[in-house]
Amino acid sequence: MTTDDLACKELVELVTEYLEGTLPPAEHARFEMHIAACDDCTTYLDQLRLTIDALGKLTEESIEPHARDDLLRLFRDWKKNN
């Protein structure tokens, strides 16, 4: 779906900056206009917020070293492919 020239795929790419409050004002406005009109992206954003809330309680020490390494590798590989 595209709403006001912001496609869902672009929203997914901007979601971290949105949640961290670092989107420039114009991008922030486009993001909010999109989620106001797109139920799927609103659901995605809500799920991400719940995940952040749940995982925010984890500490680096609570993650097994091999699991941490696997997660970092997966993230690096994902970034390379996108």
Image (cartoon, grey):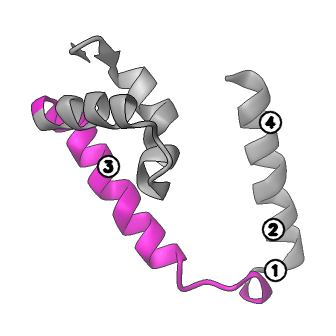
**What's the residue type where badge 4 is placed?**
Asp
**What's the residue type where badge 3 is placed?**
Leu
Which label sits on residue 64? 1
Quadrant of the frame with the C terminus: top right
Quadrant of the frame with the N terminus: top left
Viewer-nearest of labels 3 and 2?
3
Residue at the spot 53% in from the left edge and 78% down from the top edge: 56
Element carrying mark 1: loop
Element carrying mark 4: helix
* Magenta span contains residue 41: yes
Viewer-nearest of labels 1 and 3?
3
The quarter of the picture where residue 19 lies is bottom left
Element carrying mark 3: helix
Viewer-nearest of labels 3 and 4?
3
Range of residues picked out in magenta: 37-62
Circles 4, 1 touching at the beta carbon (< 8 Å): no
Which label sits on residue 43? none
> How many other residues sit within 10 Å of disc 2, few (<14), some (14-19) or many (≥20)?
some
What residue is disc 4 on?
A: 77
Which label sits on residue 68? 2
Q: In this picture, is 55 found above or below 26?
A: below
**What's the residue type where badge 1 is placed?**
Glu
> How many other residues sit within 10 Å of disc 1, few (<14), some (14-19) or many (≥20)?
few
Q: Where does residue 63 sit, x and y in percent of width and height?
A: 75, 80
Q: Spatial distance from mark 3 to mark 4, Cα to Cα?
A: 23 Å
